[in-house]
Amino acid sequence: MSTPELERIADPSPPTRPTIPRSWRPLILRLHFYAGILIAPFILIATISGGLYAVAPTIEQLMYRDYLHVDAAGAAAPVSDQIRAAQAERPDLTVAAVRPAADPGDTTRVMFTDPTLGESKRLAVFVDPATATTIGELPVYGSSGALPVRSWISELHRHLHLGEPGRLYSELAASWLWVIALGGVFLWFERYRRNPDRARLFTFDRRSKGRNRSLNWHGVAGIWIAVGLIFLSATGLTWSTYAGKNVSDLRAAMSWTTPTVTKTIGSSGAATAGDHSGHDGHSMDMSTDASTADFNVGRIDSVLDIAAADGIDGAVEASIPAAEDAAFVVAQTRQPWVMSNDSISIDGSTGAVVDISRFSDWPLAAKLSAWGIQLHMGTLFGVANQLALLALAVALASVIVRGYMMWWKRRPTRASGLSAGRPPLRGGIRRISPVSAVALAVVAGAVGWFVPLLGLSLVAFLAVDVVLGSISRARTRAAVVHDSQHESELV
């Protein structure tokens, strides 16, 4: 008998298991892998449609130039005359609002309530302000006044033209985007920390080949765009169905809602409204009194003068009240490089100011939300904003494609039939301390409750992983039993 066997017999104590070093990397790597494989298709669709939506304002200006601009010639006619011209064009509809031409060469946009267009849509008749003649008409969407091409791209990005059920795809993408981005940043920094001599953190390694080249691009590009991805995820969730409601409830509880002016004559206290007008539409009262609205058209010029005297001028939209106790509301529209938007409500019969909302008086959270919405939509900084979002979309799409290339190149090349790259090894939860595991469960539960689609899909991932693990272990045991029986038969 050999010496090691004698020592083992002499010492009957059970062998000690080797100590496993604590590390978050295996757990985050496995989560990043599964989320990347299963959620990335939704993110890729949102990325492509979002890139299109980012440049949609410029596309809109080019496609509808004949509606939006005229050859400036002479002083503008009274706004009331311009509205009358639009009413003569569409006497079957009730006028709802007007956007007077802000600069020479712009057209005036007169909006009508049209129930046939669907929720949050109105019909806009474009008028030459100098001649008070109509140029044409187009449906517009939301408070941003998006024209058909931008509306179509917006609906593609938001719900793939599938209606309310389709919004689940965009919410799922937004729910996971920040998780995948943060996980990728951790893994890339961890890779650099473990091998600083060979790994690069912020620069591409052009000498790398094969899978390493894809990994290098995936990691470096992901690092550069990570902050932008987290921003898009956070702002995108405010427009979502389930997480968006939780965000709205939180803002209401913290008094972070966006103030808006009182719209009823004789009422007191400013009402509040959500910030979802950019994507979700324009708050409109479809029950209107055509005769009252028609009578109030004659008051619009004096109302605009009163608003301008209070500093509410430039590019504005003025509502045309359709009820006797409703005030005119004149609000500055969101324009590139304009960081604040004020609004005012006016009693058309007396000219008295009912209420006024100054952007400078808004809570900081409401200001940040307004800026974030415009930045997400590509309108805060004009063309520069749009190009930045388009570049971010292209970079994210390349990161996703490179991720799938890495997975494909990891597949067993000698396997028969169609095979895929194996996932990272299980057991990541055992590599962190029990206290960390409990804290992780608590945080995951809280985040999953606040962002429901993230929580539900994470539970689904865990369930599938447990099932696959059980199947794998059963196959391994069956193979061991089969080999043991085969050896017994040989003996």
Image (tube, helix red, strand yellow):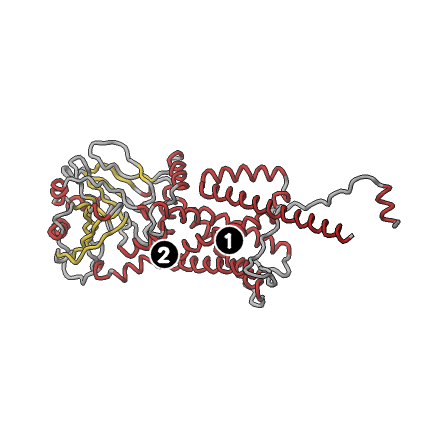
Secondary element under disc 1, as helix, strand or loop, is: helix
**For residue 104, what is the image quadrant?**
bottom left
Relative to 112, is 256 above or below? above
Q: Is residue 2 left or right of residue 410?
A: right
Is residue 267 among the parts visible in the rendering?
yes
Q: CA distance from mark 1 to mark 2?
A: 26 Å
Q: Is residue 69 above or below residue 33?
A: below
Task: Determine whether, in the image, residue 333 is placed left or right of residue 469.
Answer: left
Which of labels 1 and 2 is toward the front? 1
**Residue at the image position 48 percent from the left and 41 percent from the top:** 455
**How many numbered markers are drawn?**
2
Looking at this view, name the residue that lies furthest to the front. 489
Depth check: give the residue in front, 390 or 329. 390
482, 136: nearer the viewer: 482
The x and y percentages for residue 234 are 43, 46
Instruction: Bin the neighbour count of mark 1 within 10 Å (Cα to Cα): few under 14, some 14-19, many 20 and up.
Output: some
The residue positioned 56% from the left and 64% from the top of the image is 213
> In percent of the image, x 26 and y 47: which residue is there?
332
Inspect this view and state whether residue 308 appears. Answer: no
Question: Which residue is identified by label 2?
Answer: 54
Residue type beneath disc 1: Ile
Three-letter code, disc 2:
Ala
Residue 322 x %, y %: 17, 40
User: In the rendered structure, which disc, 1 or 2, sits on the residue that comes first in sequence?
Assistant: 1
Residue 147 or residue 81, whichever sits in front: 147
* Element type at mark 2: helix
Residue 368 is situated, as x and y percent measured from the top left of the image, at: 39, 45
Residue at the (69%, 48%) spot, across then down = 481
Q: Which mark is residue 37?
A: 1
Q: Are marks 1 and 2 in contact (CB under 8 Å)?
A: no
